[in-house]
Amino acid sequence: MADSTELRARDTIHAGGEWRAAVSGATREILDPADARPFAVVAEGDEKDTDLAVAAARRAFDEGPWPHTPVTERAALLRRVADLLVRDREELGLLESRDAGKTVEEGRVDIDCVADAFRYFADLVAAEAPGRVVDAGSPDIHSVVVHEPVGVCALITPWNYPLLQASWKIAPALAAGNTFVVKPSEITPLTTVALIGLLTEAGLPAGVANIVTGPGHTVGARMAEHPDVDLVSFTGGLVSGTKVAQAAAPTVKKVALELGGKNPNVVFADACATEEGFDTAVDQALNAAFIHSGQVCSAGARLIVEESVRDRFVTELARRAQKIRLGRGTEDGVECGPLVSAQQREKVESYVESALKEGAVLRCGGKRPEPAPERPASGYFYEPTVLDRCHREMRVVREEVFGPVLTVETFRTEDEAVTLANDTEYGLAGGVWTADPGRARRVAGRLRHGTVWINDFHPYLPQAEWGGFGKSGTGRELGPAGLAEYRETKHVYQNLAPAPVRWFRG
């Protein structure tokens, strides 16, 4: 690995079809969370860079061809982007691994999902009718409802799934005919920068796709308040999302927020009645809580298990959690990588410390692992942690930890399980494990969460809307609703045989 002095800063701000450095000349080192060493340097933009990018997007929307490009041509471009993503899958998967700390295999899967998103929105717009005819009750009246692009979209994405979350915004924004400025997380920007290059390679006109690499308090804040931005779409934490909404309010722009989650994974005893059922439920509880070191907005961080099977279930869960292989995501056999930053690890440590003070029982983890060849001491690693005997008053149960920490609560009745699962200010996702189909439907119907998995956890479909209830946000991504976020609706009423109204005496 090269020393930071040997790394050359890249021009990672793209505005009006040109790559350039920050106006201020500032740069930022990008660290590999597996060893805390820099491996890239990017431009550190600010409000001036943001204004330039927004101006480019504004010109491209008001004066350029993209908003008026036929739908078939827009769809064809999205499909070309998907093909380029497949071509560069290995390179992008590795870059996502080094940037965000996830395993290379997770990175590859992410790239596959990004390509799927571009293909899905290409197919969706290509198959749409040109408009919805409204019966006006007269053959002389032609009335139709049509969809038009919103305009300039400000897209602010998180650090945990950098390219995947960007694609959920960029693909529908382009499919609808918008221009955009994207701000990736300042700590994981590299694959989003690469995607802008692929959009250019695919033939997207200059100024349609713009990117500013830089921090949220300057770049993101300016994007949200900018008077020439028509829509702001934000994925991230509750506190930052609230600030985005407040900044956007004076200009009354459209706002889509996908925020956090504190997601329940409810396990009924009948799901564990067979050895196969028990094994599957335990395995999926591990998957729900610890994939990408728990740095997932939909992580099943709250295990809510029926009391009669709790002891056996948690004992086996903790035993397996201790065997999860931690290490650099590029190493063979590694199952879980580091946390994304030192700050994130310190946050996780504070939650575990407070939980133990409040009476939680540590079943495994709860500390930094011993260094190993595949796990440098300088990396931001933290052991998968299971906290038993938790209750709703605990901070670790109420708040989003965003780390490899699983809390355990118990219930005796179906009503109690639903009450516990819904006892959160968030409402993003949840899981239900039961062998009783009737119970599965009842409980799923009563859960106040945007996505409910039954006897599974974490899969998503591009065709299905993704969003939450409560403080999990107001936006919808993926599916037809994800495309609708980036459109305005217009009613066109045409009188084919106009005649005087004669309401007034003349």
Image (cartoon, rainbow, N blue to C red):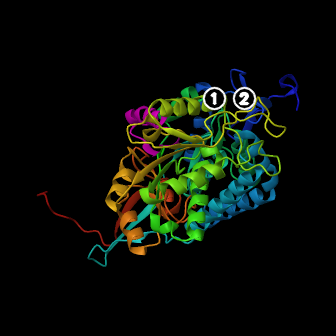
Q: Position of residue 103 (x, y in %)?
A: 74, 48
Point out the tag, 2 or 1, that comes first from the N-terminus: 2
Quadrant for the N terminus in the image:
top right
Please give the residue where the numbered disc 1 appears in the rendered image: 49
The reply to whether the C-beta atoms of the residues labelled 2 and 1 are less than 8 Å apart is yes
Residue lying at the far bottom of the rendered structure: 139
Residue 476 shows up from this direction: no
**Residues at marks 2 and 1, CA–CA distance in whole angstroms:** 10 Å
Q: Position of residue 137 (x, y in %)?
A: 26, 76
Quadrant for the C terminus in the image:
bottom left
398 relative to 163 in the view: left or right = left
11 relative to 343 in the view: left or right = right
Tag 2, which secondary structure?
strand
**Residue visible at 58% across and 26% down in the picture:** 47
Q: Which residues are magenta?
A: 231-257
For residue 455, above or below residue 205: below
Residue closest to the eye, 440 or 453:
440
Query: Could you say which quadrant of the image residue 245 lies in?
Result: top left
The amino acid type found where label 2 is placed reads Ala
23 relative to 397 in the view: left or right = right
Number of numbered labels in the structure image? 2
Q: Position of residue 98 (x, y in %)?
A: 76, 41
Q: Residue 26 colored magenta?
A: no
Please give the residue where the numbered disc 2 appears in the rendered image: 43
Residue 255 shows up from this direction: yes
Residue closest to the eye, 251 or 33:
33
Q: Residue 252 colored magenta?
A: yes
